[in-house]
């Protein structure tokens, strides 16, 4: 391995949400949370950015831009380099190349989700998504008073999820659904939807004139040997699929605020461009071009390291928490673990692990619906950090189970 993913980097006092911003995001509005350690010593396994140094190709590109041109005024994408590098990346990884005239940018996928709910969904219309779900599918719908309708995924005994197609079709045909937020690969479960599953969902949407927003931000974070198929690739002659991708998750550039939004339909794209700002951060643009052009080797090593982290997690759970239900996900660097055998459904697991062992993670209640008893763990961290965090999670889980057995009437306050 050419890159050092074992390096532990101190992110304190850098404005990092993972270290300095967790209290408001995870516990805002709740009673004060008391950790068993100083805040800066808590183990961060929650927010979906990496604890690894960002890809060298990004840093080199930004340094080059700073040294080559010392002006950072209002900037927009005028040259084709960003599209060209992105299109080459897509061609190499997915055998799919979006058309240049369909290519637009956004300040990030989350801002784009907000804009989609405002621009493409009218008053009285609804948005559909699969649950458990990324919280901002709900937040973006709520921001503009759009009803969010959910279709619960089905979890099997191994922890693998599938779509309840009968429920999916019923929700679309009996409700005023006008937009479907598809997460592909899915966050938090890590499912990489098969071509057959994608076609089943898309065909129902097409038949009912439902716009599909395909959030594919995790599409590069696959287990070795798997392949991602962009939904739009399956429907080259259909233009009501909006594809969202970004360098941010893949190369740990989330703070730079740039994403790619592919809108094939001319009328929808014009409405989008009339609404969003055309400005971009020139350093963000340089970084994205840098990684799409020169980040392949780093990306390959990253995938190998993440695969080993997932294998380690599976081994620890099998040995030390045998009642946990976990399936290594097809994609993402996020592990979705079912701990329902150890905890009651109404327990706030985010708060429990923070207060009991100083591990910051996201419990199921943060994922819209249908997630009781689950936790999401960010495995994009050095192995030593992962091992330390898992040791604490295992001890806290087994201790709670023991306390429940000994004094069920007085469970620990959380």
Image (spheres, rainbow, N blue to C red):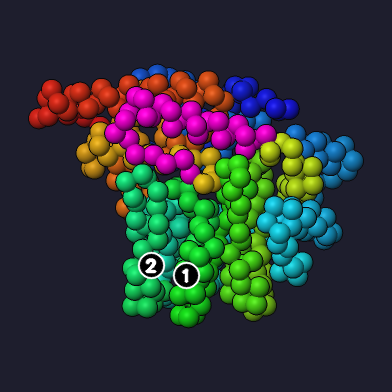
| Residue lying at 48% horizontally and 44% vertically, measured from the top left | 329
Residue 115 visible in the displayed image: no
Residue, disc 1: 200
Q: Secondary structure at mark 2?
A: helix
Where does label 2 land, which residue? Answer: 165
Q: Nearer the viewer, residue 181 or 313?
A: 313
Please say if the residues under marks 1 and 2 sit with CB atoms less than 8 Å apart. yes
The residue lying furthest to the left in this view is 409
Determine the main secondary structure of the stretch shown in magenta.
helix
Which element is circle 1 on?
helix
Q: Quadrant of residue 33?
A: top left
Magenta-span inclusion, residue 315? yes
Choose top left, top right, bottom left or bottom right for residue 262. bottom right
Q: Residue furthest right?
A: 68
Total count of labels? 2
The residue at 65%/52% (across/down) is 246
For marks 1 and 2, give the CA distance: 8 Å
Q: Residue furthest front?
A: 225
Query: Which callout, 1 or 2, points at the residue further toward the start of the chain?
Result: 2
Name the spot of residue 337 as percent of width and height, x first. Answer: 38, 39
**Is-magenta flag for residue 375?**
no
For residue 348, side relative to residue 124 (left or right)? left
**Label at residue 393:** none
Q: Residue 373 in the image: x percent, y percent?
A: 29, 41
The local crowd at label 2, few if under 14, some if 14 to 19, many if 20 or more residues have their Cα within 10 Å, is some
Q: Where on the picture, by quarter, is residue 90?
A: bottom right
Looking at the rendering, in which quadrant would you find the C terminus?
top left
For the magenta stretch, what is the residue range?
301-329
């Amino acid at each position: 391995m050419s890159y050092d993913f074992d390096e532990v980097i101190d992110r304190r006092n850098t404005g990092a949400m993972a270290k300095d911003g967790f209290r408001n995001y995870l516990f805002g509005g709740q009673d004060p949370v008391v950790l068993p350690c100083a805040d800066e010593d808590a183990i961060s396994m929650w927010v979906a950015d990496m604890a690894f140094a960002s890809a060298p190709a990004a840093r080199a590109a930004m340094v080059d831009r700073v040294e080559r041109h010392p002006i950072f005024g209002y900037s927009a994408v005028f040259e084709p380099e960003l599209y060209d590098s992105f299109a080459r990346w897509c061609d190499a990884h997915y055998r799919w190349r979006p058309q240049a005239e369909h290519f637009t940018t956004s300040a990030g996928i989350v801002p784009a989700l907000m804009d989609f709910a405002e621009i493409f969904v009218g008053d009285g219309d609804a948005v559909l998504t699969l649950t458990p779900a990324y919280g901002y599918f709900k937040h973006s719908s709520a921001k503009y008073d759009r009803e969010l309708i959910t279709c619960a995924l089905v979890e099997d005994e191994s922890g693998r999820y599938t779509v309840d197609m009968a429920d999916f079709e019923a929700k679309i045909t009996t409700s005023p659904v006008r937009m479907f937020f598809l997460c592909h690969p899915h966050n938090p479960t890590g499912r990489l939807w098969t071509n057959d599953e994608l076609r089943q969902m898309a065909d129902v949407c097409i038949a009912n004139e439902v716009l599909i927003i395909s959030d594919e931000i995790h599409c590069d974070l696959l287990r070795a040997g798997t392949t991602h198929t962009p939904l739009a690739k399956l429907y080259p002659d259909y233009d009501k699929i909006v594809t969202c991708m970004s360098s941010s998750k893949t190369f740990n550039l989330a703070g730079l605020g740039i994403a790619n939004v592919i809108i094939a339909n001319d009328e929808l794209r014009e409405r989008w461009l009339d609404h969003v700002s055309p400005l971009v951060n020139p350093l963000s643009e340089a970084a994205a071009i840098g990684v799409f052009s020169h980040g392949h080797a780093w990306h390959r090593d990253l995938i190998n390291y993440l695969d080993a982290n997932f294998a380690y997690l599976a081994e620890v759970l099998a040995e030390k928490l045998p009642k946990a239900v976990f399936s290594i996900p097809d994609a993402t660097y996020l592990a979705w673990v079912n701990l329902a055998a150890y905890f009651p459904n109404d327990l706030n697991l985010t708060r429990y692990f923070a207060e009991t062992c100083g591990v910051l993670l996201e419990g199921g209640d943060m994922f819209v619906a249908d997630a009781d008893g689950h936790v999401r763990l960010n495995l994009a961290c050095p192995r030593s950090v992962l091992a330390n965090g898992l040791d604490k999670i295992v001890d806290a889980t087994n201790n709670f189970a023991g306390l429940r057995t000994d004094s069920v009437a007085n469970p620990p306050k959380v």
